[in-house]
Image (spheres, rainbow, N blue to C red):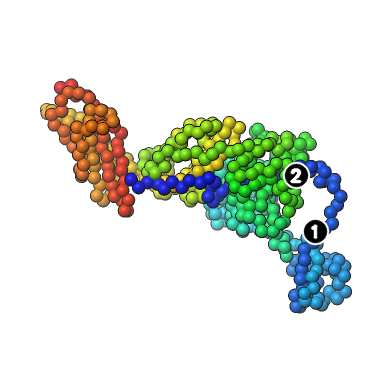
Amino acid sequence: MRGARAVRATAAPFLAFALAFVALPRGAEARENAPAQPPEMTPYVARPGDSLYDIATRYLRNPADWKKLASLNHVSEPRHLRPGTTLRVPVALLRQDGLSAKVIAANGPVQHAFRTGPLLPLTVGASLVEGDRVQTGHNGFATLELADGSHIALPPDTSLDLATLRQTALTGATDRIVDLHHGEVSNEVTHATKKDDRFQIRSPSVVAGVRGTQFRVSYDGDKGATAVEVLDGAVGVDADSVARNGRSALARPPSPGTPLSASEQLVAAHHGNLTLTGRPAGAPVTLLDAPELLQPSKVQDDEAVVFEIAPSAGASAWRVQIGRDAGLLDMIRDQRSADPRVSFANLEDGTYFVRLSAIDASGLEGMPASYAFERRRVALGTSAGPIEGSRDFAFRWFIDRNAPNTRFRFVLGTTSDLRVPLIDRTDITTGDAVVRDLPKGVYYWTVIAEQFDNGHYYQKASPVQSFRLDW
């Protein structure tokens, strides 16, 4: 049987989630009270035809600040700069331009609004900007793509704000801050190319900052806990000093360029931590290994799609997600279960990808494994009974999915495993079979439909049924 290709992944291939909390680093209070640092500068090399007026207009928030450039760089002729002259430009004066996030997937109830405006349905292809908020309903999913190719995936019951989406003129440094109010975000962040590039997820407990990694961040308001799970790279995690001082607020982000090593906790790949609001950042713990899917090549042809997960040590629950792409950027199902047998209803035919992860007793979600599978629903109905006025027994069946060259195999035996069949007929093209002169006893039978469809071979077997003859 040709079934679904198993695509294992020690970390989700695309969406790859690496969530980090970089709030105020260890010794945040000391940093706040530290002596003022000299303003940060960036160089600009004058080109032919440049003037301070032109440079200020192109790069500064306030073009009138050309005077500050002239004073700082001792320029006496602002209208005429010698080509090749290197100017020092204060970063604080540079203009910041707004960036956008593109919606590349949206399924189920998903809404957005700009600041305090009314919530509207979110559609694929829409552009979101700084100040937009996004929330997913109970069965809602959304994935946002930033200009550098980073992705932010929102599973159901999540609410967040795009607090900062900016790029600094001249330096090109980007500043992306997401405020997570409840729920979870999975992130695949491209590696930072500039030291002042900043990507952070803030919750009421922590700030998570990364410079290129895959991680998940989730915030449970009822428990006042933030979980960070790092799949690849490293994440700096810091507890929020504001919350620790008795006031609830979103954690304050450190300045761009703050090294992750300055964080209260540095969480490496395959590790995670839990932080309670108002408490120090939790210690990193090892995440559970990716679970194994039993029968990964099985074609999902029953009414419900069912996944059997091999039990593993330390797992108290499992998470199963389904998407239309290998990275699950276009996610359509998400379910947590205390049972390693997880089922989904109402899934249309097609090729999908399933991602599995185990959850430990503390609630931390482990490393993921992804598999491709085929959904091809087939109903095979059967019936059997004696033919009146004879010692013949008739068996009938039907299949609701016709395909060219459909054949049926009929098997009858005296044991439920049918290992030693009394009858094993193949290449039946009709929907019935008659067996004559069966002696008294208990019998077991099944019928198997065999189809070639679009160059693929499929089998569908009916449940093994039994009957007793007492004549």
Residue toward you, 133 or 149: 149
- For mark 2, give the secondary structure: loop
**Mark nearer the N terminus (1 vs 2):** 2
What amino acid type should be assigned to the residue bearing mark 1?
Glu
Q: In which quarter of the image is the C terminus?
A: top left
For the residues bearing labels 1 and 2, Cβ distance under 8 angstroms: no
Residue furthest left in the image: 389
Q: Which mark is drawn over residue 225? A: none
Quadrant in which residue 95 is drawn: bottom right
Where is residue 169 drawn, in percent x and y? 72, 63
What amino acid type should be assigned to the residue bearing mark 2?
Pro
98 is higher (above) or lower (below) than 141: below
Q: Which mark is drawn over residue 40? A: 1
Where is residue 103 drawn, in percent x and y? 57, 54
User: Residue at (59%, 57%) from the top-left corner?
Assistant: 149
User: Residue at (27%, 42%) from the top-left corner?
Assistant: 449
